[in-house]
Protein backbone atom coordinates (compact mmCIF):
# COMPACT_ATOMS: atom_id res chain seq x y z
CA UNK A 1 0.00 0.00 0.00
CA UNK A 2 1.39 3.45 -0.95
CA UNK A 3 1.57 6.12 1.74
CA UNK A 4 1.43 9.82 0.85
CA UNK A 5 3.20 12.45 2.91
CA UNK A 6 0.67 15.25 2.37
CA UNK A 7 -2.74 15.35 4.12
CA UNK A 8 -5.66 17.78 3.83
CA UNK A 9 -5.16 19.27 7.30
CA UNK A 10 -6.74 22.68 6.47
CA UNK A 11 -9.99 20.92 5.58
CA UNK A 12 -9.88 18.88 8.75
CA UNK A 13 -9.19 22.01 10.81
CA UNK A 14 -12.09 23.84 9.16
CA UNK A 15 -14.43 20.94 9.88
CA UNK A 16 -13.22 20.84 13.44
CA UNK A 17 -13.92 24.57 13.82
CA UNK A 18 -17.44 24.17 12.44
CA UNK A 19 -18.11 21.22 14.71
CA UNK A 20 -16.80 23.16 17.71
CA UNK A 21 -19.12 26.09 16.89
CA UNK A 22 -22.13 23.80 16.51
CA UNK A 23 -21.23 21.97 19.71
CA UNK A 24 -20.95 25.27 21.61
CA UNK A 25 -24.34 26.34 20.24
CA UNK A 26 -26.00 23.12 21.38
CA UNK A 27 -24.44 23.38 24.84
CA UNK A 28 -25.51 27.03 25.09
CA UNK A 29 -29.11 26.23 24.16
CA UNK A 30 -29.28 23.40 26.68
CA UNK A 31 -27.75 25.44 29.49
CA UNK A 32 -29.78 28.63 28.86
CA UNK A 33 -33.03 26.90 27.79
CA UNK A 34 -33.18 29.45 24.94
CA UNK A 35 -32.61 28.96 21.26
CA UNK A 36 -29.69 30.73 19.63
CA UNK A 37 -30.70 34.07 18.08
CA UNK A 38 -27.81 33.91 15.64
CA UNK A 39 -29.09 30.66 14.19
CA UNK A 40 -32.63 31.97 13.61
CA UNK A 41 -32.85 35.80 13.31
CA UNK A 42 -36.43 35.62 12.01
CA UNK A 43 -37.50 33.90 15.22
CA UNK A 44 -35.69 36.59 17.21
CA UNK A 45 -37.81 39.28 15.53
CA UNK A 46 -40.96 37.25 16.24
CA UNK A 47 -39.95 36.80 19.88
CA UNK A 48 -39.45 40.56 20.26
CA UNK A 49 -42.88 41.20 18.76
CA UNK A 50 -44.44 38.70 21.16
CA UNK A 51 -42.63 40.33 24.09
CA UNK A 52 -43.90 43.77 23.07
CA UNK A 53 -47.49 42.55 22.78
CA UNK A 54 -47.28 40.72 26.11
CA UNK A 55 -45.91 43.79 27.90
CA UNK A 56 -48.57 45.99 26.30
CA UNK A 57 -51.37 43.59 27.20
CA UNK A 58 -50.20 43.35 30.80
CA UNK A 59 -50.05 47.13 31.16
CA UNK A 60 -53.46 47.52 29.54
CA UNK A 61 -54.86 44.95 31.98
CA UNK A 62 -53.42 47.04 34.82
CA UNK A 63 -55.16 50.09 33.33
CA UNK A 64 -58.45 48.20 33.18
CA UNK A 65 -58.10 47.05 36.78
CA UNK A 66 -57.66 50.71 37.75
CA UNK A 67 -60.83 51.45 35.81
CA UNK A 68 -62.68 48.68 37.65
CA UNK A 69 -61.53 50.14 40.98
CA UNK A 70 -62.72 53.56 39.81
CA UNK A 71 -66.21 52.26 39.01
CA UNK A 72 -66.34 50.59 42.42
CA UNK A 73 -65.50 53.90 44.12
CA UNK A 74 -68.18 55.66 42.08
CA UNK A 75 -70.79 52.99 42.80
CA UNK A 76 -70.09 53.14 46.53
CA UNK A 77 -70.60 56.90 46.50
CA UNK A 78 -73.77 56.63 44.42
CA UNK A 79 -75.13 53.96 46.73
CA UNK A 80 -74.80 56.32 49.68
CA UNK A 81 -76.42 59.18 47.74
CA UNK A 82 -79.24 56.84 46.78
CA UNK A 83 -79.79 55.77 50.40
CA UNK A 84 -79.69 59.40 51.60
CA UNK A 85 -82.12 60.53 48.92
CA UNK A 86 -84.47 57.65 49.65
CA UNK A 87 -84.43 58.67 53.32
CA UNK A 88 -85.14 62.30 52.37
CA UNK A 89 -88.10 61.06 50.35
CA UNK A 90 -89.41 59.16 53.37
CA UNK A 91 -89.06 62.33 55.46
CA UNK A 92 -90.84 64.29 52.74
CA UNK A 93 -93.77 61.90 52.85
CA UNK A 94 -93.85 62.26 56.64
CA UNK A 95 -93.78 66.06 56.26
CA UNK A 96 -96.89 65.87 54.06
CA UNK A 97 -98.97 65.41 57.19
CA UNK A 98 -100.58 68.63 58.44
CA UNK A 99 -100.97 67.16 61.91
CA UNK A 100 -97.24 67.48 62.64
CA UNK A 101 -96.22 69.83 65.40
CA UNK A 102 -93.83 72.68 64.69
CA UNK A 103 -91.08 70.84 66.57
CA UNK A 104 -91.67 67.62 64.65
CA UNK A 105 -91.55 69.46 61.31
CA UNK A 106 -88.36 71.28 62.34
CA UNK A 107 -86.71 67.97 63.27
CA UNK A 108 -87.70 66.44 59.93
CA UNK A 109 -86.37 69.49 58.07
CA UNK A 110 -83.06 69.33 59.97
CA UNK A 111 -82.51 65.64 59.19
CA UNK A 112 -83.32 66.30 55.54
CA UNK A 113 -80.86 69.21 55.46
CA UNK A 114 -78.05 67.09 56.94
CA UNK A 115 -78.65 64.33 54.42
CA UNK A 116 -78.63 66.93 51.65
CA UNK A 117 -75.27 68.26 52.89
CA UNK A 118 -73.94 64.71 52.95
CA UNK A 119 -74.98 64.24 49.33
CA UNK A 120 -73.33 67.51 48.37
CA UNK A 121 -70.06 66.48 50.04
CA UNK A 122 -70.10 63.13 48.26
CA UNK A 123 -70.69 64.73 44.84
CA UNK A 124 -67.93 67.28 45.38
CA UNK A 125 -65.32 64.96 46.87
CA UNK A 126 -65.74 61.61 45.12
CA UNK A 127 -62.64 61.15 42.98
CA UNK A 128 -60.15 58.53 41.86
CA UNK A 129 -56.53 59.59 41.97
CA UNK A 130 -57.61 63.21 41.63
CA UNK A 131 -60.13 62.70 38.84
CA UNK A 132 -63.64 63.75 39.91
CA UNK A 133 -66.31 61.18 39.15
CA UNK A 134 -69.71 62.76 39.77
CA UNK A 135 -69.34 66.31 38.42
CA UNK A 136 -69.47 65.70 34.69
CA UNK A 137 -66.42 67.32 33.02
CA UNK A 138 -66.22 64.95 30.06
CA UNK A 139 -65.06 61.38 29.59
CA UNK A 140 -62.32 59.39 31.25
CA UNK A 141 -60.39 57.23 28.76
CA UNK A 142 -58.61 53.96 29.41
CA UNK A 143 -55.95 52.39 27.18
CA UNK A 144 -57.52 48.95 27.05
CA UNK A 145 -55.15 47.09 24.74
CA UNK A 146 -51.63 46.81 23.43
CA UNK A 147 -52.29 48.75 20.22
CA UNK A 148 -53.35 52.21 19.11
CA UNK A 149 -57.11 52.67 19.18
CA UNK A 150 -57.67 50.14 21.96
CA UNK A 151 -59.44 52.61 24.23
CA UNK A 152 -62.55 52.63 26.39
CA UNK A 153 -64.35 55.84 27.34
CA UNK A 154 -66.23 56.40 30.60
CA UNK A 155 -68.79 59.19 30.69
CA UNK A 156 -68.92 60.94 34.06
CA UNK A 157 -72.41 61.92 35.27
CA UNK A 158 -73.07 65.46 36.47
CA UNK A 159 -74.88 65.19 39.80
CA UNK A 160 -74.08 68.73 40.97
CA UNK A 161 -77.67 69.81 40.27
CA UNK A 162 -79.42 67.17 42.35
CA UNK A 163 -82.19 68.71 44.42
CA UNK A 164 -81.24 66.41 47.28
CA UNK A 165 -77.68 67.78 47.34
CA UNK A 166 -78.44 71.50 47.11
CA UNK A 167 -80.65 71.99 50.15
CA UNK A 168 -83.66 72.62 47.93
CA UNK A 169 -86.03 70.29 49.76
CA UNK A 170 -88.54 72.51 51.56
CA UNK A 171 -90.51 70.57 54.17
CA UNK A 172 -91.93 73.58 55.98
CA UNK A 173 -95.50 72.62 55.07
CA UNK A 174 -97.51 69.72 53.74
CA UNK A 175 -97.97 71.53 50.43
CA UNK A 176 -94.22 72.18 50.05
CA UNK A 177 -93.47 68.56 50.87
CA UNK A 178 -95.90 67.43 48.17
CA UNK A 179 -94.08 69.52 45.57
CA UNK A 180 -90.70 68.12 46.65
CA UNK A 181 -91.64 64.51 45.96
CA UNK A 182 -91.43 64.83 42.17
CA UNK A 183 -88.00 66.47 42.41
CA UNK A 184 -86.75 63.67 44.66
CA UNK A 185 -88.09 61.06 42.25
CA UNK A 186 -86.12 62.80 39.50
CA UNK A 187 -82.99 62.68 41.69
CA UNK A 188 -83.43 58.98 42.37
CA UNK A 189 -83.85 58.31 38.65
CA UNK A 190 -80.63 60.22 37.90
CA UNK A 191 -78.69 58.32 40.56
CA UNK A 192 -80.06 54.96 39.40
CA UNK A 193 -79.10 55.79 35.81
CA UNK A 194 -75.57 56.74 36.88
CA UNK A 195 -75.19 53.52 38.86
CA UNK A 196 -76.42 51.52 35.88
CA UNK A 197 -73.91 53.26 33.59
CA UNK A 198 -71.00 52.65 35.95
CA UNK A 199 -72.10 49.04 36.38
CA UNK A 200 -72.19 48.49 32.62
CA UNK A 201 -68.72 50.01 32.24
CA UNK A 202 -67.42 47.89 35.11
CA UNK A 203 -68.72 44.73 33.43
CA UNK A 204 -67.13 45.75 30.15
CA UNK A 205 -63.80 46.52 31.84
CA UNK A 206 -63.89 43.19 33.68
CA UNK A 207 -64.56 41.28 30.45
CA UNK A 208 -61.80 43.16 28.63
CA UNK A 209 -59.34 42.50 31.46
CA UNK A 210 -60.16 38.78 31.38
CA UNK A 211 -59.70 38.75 27.60
CA UNK A 212 -56.31 40.47 27.93
CA UNK A 213 -55.27 37.96 30.59
CA UNK A 214 -56.13 35.11 28.22
CA UNK A 215 -54.38 36.86 25.32
CA UNK A 216 -51.25 37.44 27.39
CA UNK A 217 -51.14 33.78 28.41
CA UNK A 218 -51.54 32.64 24.79
CA UNK A 219 -48.84 35.05 23.60
CA UNK A 220 -46.51 33.86 26.36
CA UNK A 221 -47.08 30.26 25.31
CA UNK A 222 -46.42 31.15 21.67
CA UNK A 223 -43.28 33.05 22.62
CA UNK A 224 -42.10 30.09 24.67
CA UNK A 225 -42.61 27.72 21.75
CA UNK A 226 -40.44 29.95 19.56
CA UNK A 227 -37.83 30.98 22.11
CA UNK A 228 -37.35 27.99 24.38
CA UNK A 229 -35.07 25.10 23.63
CA UNK A 230 -36.53 21.85 22.31
CA UNK A 231 -34.61 19.62 24.70
CA UNK A 232 -35.15 16.42 22.72
CA UNK A 233 -33.91 17.98 19.48
CA UNK A 234 -31.09 19.88 21.20
CA UNK A 235 -29.88 16.76 23.02
CA UNK A 236 -29.93 14.72 19.80
CA UNK A 237 -28.05 17.50 18.04
CA UNK A 238 -25.50 17.64 20.87
CA UNK A 239 -24.83 13.90 20.58
CA UNK A 240 -24.47 14.26 16.82
CA UNK A 241 -21.98 17.10 17.19
CA UNK A 242 -20.01 15.17 19.81
CA UNK A 243 -19.75 12.15 17.47
CA UNK A 244 -18.60 14.40 14.65
CA UNK A 245 -16.04 16.08 16.86
CA UNK A 246 -14.65 12.74 18.01
CA UNK A 247 -14.49 11.49 14.41
CA UNK A 248 -12.72 14.66 13.34
CA UNK A 249 -10.16 14.32 16.14
CA UNK A 250 -9.52 10.72 15.11
CA UNK A 251 -9.11 11.78 11.48
CA UNK A 252 -6.66 14.49 12.45
CA UNK A 253 -4.67 12.04 14.55
CA UNK A 254 -4.50 9.60 11.65
CA UNK A 255 -3.50 12.37 9.24
CA UNK A 256 -0.75 13.50 11.56
CA UNK A 257 0.53 9.93 12.05
CA UNK A 258 0.70 9.03 8.33
CA UNK A 259 3.70 11.25 7.45
CA UNK A 260 5.57 9.91 10.44
CA UNK A 261 5.00 6.36 9.22
CA UNK A 262 6.36 7.26 5.76
CA UNK A 263 9.41 8.94 7.24
CA UNK A 264 10.09 5.90 9.43
CA UNK A 265 10.00 3.65 6.38
CA UNK A 266 12.34 5.97 4.48
CA UNK A 267 14.86 5.95 7.33
CA UNK A 268 14.89 2.18 7.61
Image: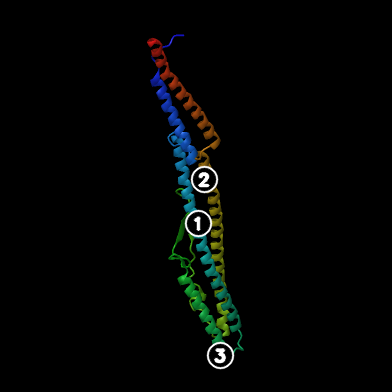
Crowdedness near tag 3: few (<14), some (14–19) or many (≥20) residues, C-alpha within 10 Å = few
The reply to whether residue 169 is visible in this rendering is no
Q: Secondary structure at mark 1?
A: helix
Question: How far across and down, in percent of the image, does residue 25 sit?
Answer: 45, 34
The residue beneath circle 1 is 64
Q: Earlier in the sequence, mark 2 or mark 1?
A: 1
Asked if labels 3 and 2 touch by Cβ distance under 8 angstroms, the answer is no
Placement of 162 over or under 263, stated as above or below? below
Mark carried by residue 220:
2
Q: Nearer the viewer, mark 2 or mark 1?
A: 2
Placement of 49 over or under 206, stated as above or below? above
Asked if labels 1 and 2 touch by Cβ distance under 8 angstroms, the answer is no
Q: Secondary structure at mark 3?
A: helix
Q: Residue, x 58% and y 75% (percent of image)? A: 86
The residue beneath circle 3 is 103
Crowdedness near tag 1: few (<14), some (14–19) or many (≥20) residues, C-alpha within 10 Å = many
Q: Locate the C terminus and report the quarter of the image it occupies.
A: top left
Q: Nearer the viewer, mark 2 or mark 3?
A: 2
How many numbered circles does the render carry? 3
Q: Earlier in the sequence, mark 3 or mark 1?
A: 1
Q: Nearer the viewer, residue 248 or 217?
A: 248
Question: How far across and down, in percent of the image, does residue 21 sit?
Answer: 43, 31
Q: Nearer the viewer, residue 103 or 23?
A: 23
Quarter where residue 171 is shown: bottom right
Residue at mark 2 to residue at mark 1: CA–CA distance: 20 Å
Q: Residue, x 52% and y 45% (percent of image)? A: 220
Question: How far across and down, in percent of the image, does residue 174 sit?
Answer: 58, 84
Residue at mark 3 to residue at mark 1: CA–CA distance: 52 Å
Amino acid sequence: MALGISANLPSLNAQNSLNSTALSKSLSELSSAKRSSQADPASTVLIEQFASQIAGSNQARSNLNDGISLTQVADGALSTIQDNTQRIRELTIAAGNDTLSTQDRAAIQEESNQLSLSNSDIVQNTNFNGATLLQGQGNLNFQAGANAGDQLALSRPDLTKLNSSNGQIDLSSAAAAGQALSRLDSDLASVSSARSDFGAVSNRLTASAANLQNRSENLSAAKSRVADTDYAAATANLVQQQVRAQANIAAQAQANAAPQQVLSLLRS
